[in-house]
Image (cartoon, rainbow, N blue to C red):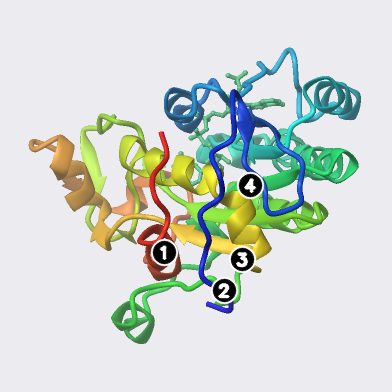
Amino acid sequence: MSAAPPHAAAPAPGNAVGHGAGDAAGPLLLTGGSGRLGRELRALLPDALAPTRAELDVTDVVSVRAAFARLGPAVVVHAAAFTDVPAAERERAACWRVNVLGTRHVADACAEVGALLVHVSTDYVFWGDTDPERAARGGYRESDPTGPVRNAYALSKLAAEDEARRAPRHLIVRTSFRPRAWPYATGFTDVRTSQAYVDEIAPELALLARHAAELVDAGVRVLHVAGPPTTVFELARRRKPDVAPATKAEAGVALPDDVVLDSGMWRSWRARLAPRR
Ligand SMILES: NC(=O)c1ccc[n+]([C@@H]2O[C@H](COP(=O)([O-])OP(=O)(O)OC[C@H]3O[C@@H](n4cnc5c(N)ncnc54)[C@H](OP(=O)(O)O)[C@@H]3O)[C@@H](O)[C@H]2O)c1
């Protein structure tokens, strides 16, 4: 980590988010607030502004600009995305429009109003082959090269990371999560992952969002926030003990073998950040 130790920012009043020294405060804006992650974040960040898609359609630059001008965010957590991996194969243009163009609009709007962008990305930006050396050191690090990718959704999220970098103050957070309850009858035994359940990841991301300015001011631009290494099957078994084993060949879409993320950098930051509720 090239970053200096984090400092404790003063709590900000109302729905304002504490910024780094010398910066103005303003509200936290959440895109994708009706989604799996977004709903959890709204509960954890009750002061966040979470416009609906009708109020802020990320594919529509006019809608994005108008919402940003009206709401004046200091920090934007961009969780809106096209996330249906199999559907993305069939609807590539729609997926690209939401994930890539949408992120460009959000990043440019952040630049216009001086907001910090926390961009929610994914472990799928990595190829995810089986690599014993990488597994032994704990998985993909922030500095590891991304790509090539396995599917259309992953490609759009990889391109979206580049769009997010258009915001001068940005933090790309690669994560992976499942809904609170395992939704399938089966779980893959041949996919290694650091996925966790959304109610386990969301508190981490909420803490990160509150401290995003400290992280960015310290030079952090990419962070991995995930759970411990496991298989998809073992993850499923934690919440659905009768889940049946299956293999990724049954997914109907190309998936990686091992996309475990090393979250060590986040863990060392987290240990020094006092949770603020
Ligand atoms: N779920 C995972 O396994 C996973 C893993 C790694 C990373 N991620 C990333 O985490 C983030 C959140 O994922 P999620 O699983 O919570 O997603 P989700 O449940 O599919 O929700 C997607 C959200 O995006 C909104 N959205 C879609 N198109 C939009 C548009 N044109 N304008 C504005 N909002 C739009 C949806 O609004 P509507 O309700 O109006 O449709 C919804 O609120 C995404 O960036 C995703 O790529 C997810």
Would you say the residues marked 4 and 2 are in contact, meaning their CB atoms lie under 8 Å apart? no
Q: Which residue is mark 4?
A: 118
Q: CA distance from mark 4 to mark 2?
A: 19 Å
Would you say the residues marked 4 and 1 are in contact, meaning their CB atoms lie under 8 Å apart? no
| Circle 2 or circle 1, nearest the eye | 2
Q: CA distance from mark 4 to mark 1?
A: 21 Å
**Nearest to the observer: residue 41 or residue 21:** 21
Which residue is drawn at the image coordinates 53% and 60% (left, top)?
Answer: 7
Of labels 1 and 3, earlier in sequence is 3
User: Is the residue indicated by label 4 positioned so its CB lies within 8 Å of ligand 1?
Assistant: no
What crowding class fits label 2: few (fewer than 14 Cα within 10 Å), some (14-19), or many (20 or more)? Answer: few
Which residue is drawn at the image coordinates 14% and 43% (left, top)?
Answer: 237
Q: Which residue is mark 1?
A: 259
Q: CA distance from mark 1 to mark 3?
A: 22 Å
Of labels 2 and 1, earlier in sequence is 2
Q: Which residue is mark 3?
A: 220
Of the residues shown, which amino acid type is indicated by label 3? Val
**Mark 2 element type:** loop
Q: CA distance from mark 3 to mark 2?
A: 10 Å
Of labels 4 and 2, earlier in sequence is 2
* Quadrant the C terminus occupies: top left
Of labels 3 and 4, earlier in sequence is 4
Q: Quadrant of residue 50?
A: top right
What crowding class fits label 4: few (fewer than 14 Cα within 10 Å), some (14-19), or many (20 or more)? Answer: many
